[in-house]
Amino acid sequence: MLWAATLRRYGTPAPVVVGVPVTGRTGGRHGAIGGLCTNTVPLALDVEPDRLLEPLVAAARAQLTAGMDAGLYPLARAVEAVRPDREPGRTPLVETLITYQENPLPDVRGLLEALSGSETELALDTLVLRTVPIERRSCRYDLDLVVTPGPEGLHLTLDYAADLFTERTARAVLDTFCAALAASERTYGARLADLTVLSDHDAALLERIGRCATPPLEPSLLQRVRAVAEHTPGAPAIQGPHQVWSHAEFTRQVERVAHALRLVDDGRS
């Protein structure tokens, strides 16, 4: 759920659709098949900021459970049924994943670490293997958050499409998600808006941008608007679906609001 909220913060439209790979080996008839038997379940997640986290997580869990019950239904057929707008170079329905790694051989120590791309040793009876981490140069989806359980907690890896994201941007997305996770551990009964916090990197960037030595704009923005209103009072300043304000009307409305604020500041109603 927090992963969807993080994606929403970076511009993903709501509801945020996240794909979850699920196993396709549901019966003995698949036991003799060699290879990767998985299917992708798309989850459409509500990320309204005023909603409480707990019911949102419960709704996401129920949606995932229902999707796993239909996990053998091919995603390609679901795409044919939904018929989403197609764009060259874009995957239909799902553009981001969250992948939870499971250990198919619990007795083999280090297997999950190897699957997550970490350097480790695998002992297979008398055969000892050492993994060699290599840099990933491709990603099938825009983003894939890989969660690997370990003895010291969860290990998070973010795979990203290098033609869409730089390493710096991908790291900022992952840091924001980790900050939201940390905030959820400290807050009980929180709204989603309370957990979409700034990462340390983004907070430092905001602090650096907000504290600059640039002098104030001269003349001020209000003075510039007044000057335009004097020279071209009938020129459109604000255009809405049913009404257009000229610069003269906009200036009058601003003066009314400023006058009302001065009265409030003076203690008068």
Image (tube, rainbow, N blue to C red):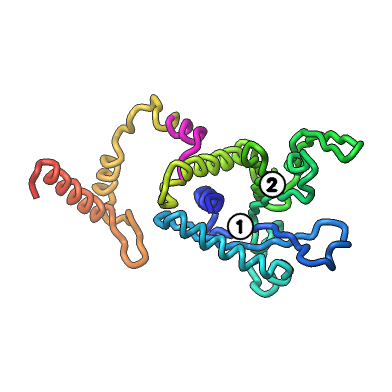
**Residue 18 - label:** 1
> Could you tell me which residue is drawn at 44 percent across and 34 percent down?
206
**Residue 79 position in % (x across, y down):** 68, 69
Left or right of 263, for residue 108: right
Q: Secondary structure at mark 2?
A: loop
Left or right of 262, for residue 34: right
- Report if residue 251 is visible in the image: yes
Q: Main secondary structure of the magenta part?
A: helix
**Residue 40 position in % (x across, y down):** 69, 61
**Quadrant in the rendering for residue 23:** bottom right
Q: Which residue is nearer to you in this view: 60 or 46?
A: 60
Mark 2 crowdedness (10 Å alpha carbons): few <14, some 14-19, many ≥20: some
> Could you tell me which residue is drawn at 79 percent across and 60 percent down?
37
Q: Is residue 255 magenta?
A: no
Q: Secondary structure at mark 1?
A: strand
Residue designated by label 2: 161
**Residue type, mark 2 in image:** Ala
Q: Which residue is nearer to you in this view: 102 or 178?
A: 102
**Residue type, mark 1 in image:** Val
Extreme residue in the left direction: 268
- Tell me the mark number nearer the camera, choosing from 1 and 2: 1
| Residue at mark 1 to residue at mark 2: CA–CA distance | 16 Å
> Could you tell me which residue is drawn at 67 percent across and 69 percent down?
69
- Residue interval drawn in magenta: 196-207
How many marks do you count on the picture? 2
> Could you tell me which residue is drawn at 58 percent across and 65 percent down?
63
Q: Which residue is nearer to you in this view: 260 or 194?
A: 194
Above or below residue 179? Residue 25 is below
Residues under numbered marks 1 and 2 in contact, where contact means CB atoms less than 8 Å apart? no
